[in-house]
Image (tube, rainbow, N blue to C red):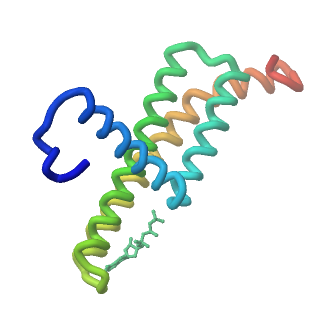
Amino acid sequence: MGLQDRNKKGFRRLLRSFKYATEGLMYVLKNEQNMQIHLITAVCILVAAYFFQLPLNHWLILLLVIAGMFSLEIMNTAIERTVDLVTKDFHPLAKRAKDIAAAAVFVYCLFAVIIGLLLFLPPILQFFQKGQLLPF
Ligand SMILES: Nc1ncnc2c1ncn2[C@@H]1O[C@H](COP(=O)(O)OP(=O)(O)OP(=O)(O)O)[C@@H](O)[C@H]1O
């Protein structure tokens, strides 16, 4: 979209916004190792949720946590690139901004792990108590 189109409204602008958002998503997926790790982890978690036949409300919690994780990593990358745009030199404030953005992802990750344990531990324990080899 040219900068002159910024104030235009309508379906075409909506489509363009979608295209740019997709480009941003593809960039993060291609270039950010952490995002690739989040993606692989999310797939494993969803496969595990399927095998352990988690109830719908647990699926909804998992999906919310995964969506939050992805969104936060994307915002973290946006902040990193913005800081790089402002300065390529070492600057204490650049360090602060990047470290704080990374801290947001870290805090979310910690709570995501706690939520994952709370959701998966009961079915895992039940699975071993039953002495089953496979949960299906
Ligand atoms: N311009 C800068 N000035 C001072 N410290 C910086 C600067 N750029 C990066 N750092 C420090 O280096 C760390 C790593 O920064 P970098 O931009 O490489 O991100 P990253 O940790 O590789 O993130 P990711 O792996 O998610 O891309 C930052 O958290 C910060 O502490």
Q: Quarter for ligand 1? A: bottom left
Percent position (x, y) of residue 37? 59, 52
Instruction: Name the quadrant of the C terminus.
Output: top right
Give left or right: position of 9 versus 113: left
Percent position (x, y) of residue 89? 29, 86
Q: Residue furthest left?
A: 7
Q: Residue at x 51, y 61 (%)?
A: 31
Residue in the foreground of this view, choosing between 35 and 124: 35
Residue in the foreground of this view, choosing between 31 and 99: 31
Quarter of the view holding residue 92: bottom left
Quarter of the view holding residue 14: top left
Percent position (x, y) of residue 103? 36, 59
Residue in the foreground of this view, choosing between 111 and 81: 81
Q: Can you see residue 62?
A: yes
- On screen, 77 above or below 97? above
Number of numbered discs = 0
Q: Residue at x 57, y 52 (%)?
A: 36
Residue in the foreground of this view, choosing between 89 and 2: 2
Quarter of the view holding residue 9: top left
Q: Residue at x 24, y 35 (%)?
A: 13
Q: Residue furthest top?
A: 56
Percent position (x, y) of residue 68? 40, 38
Q: Residue at x 54, y 56 (%)?
A: 30
Q: Can you see residue 107?
A: no
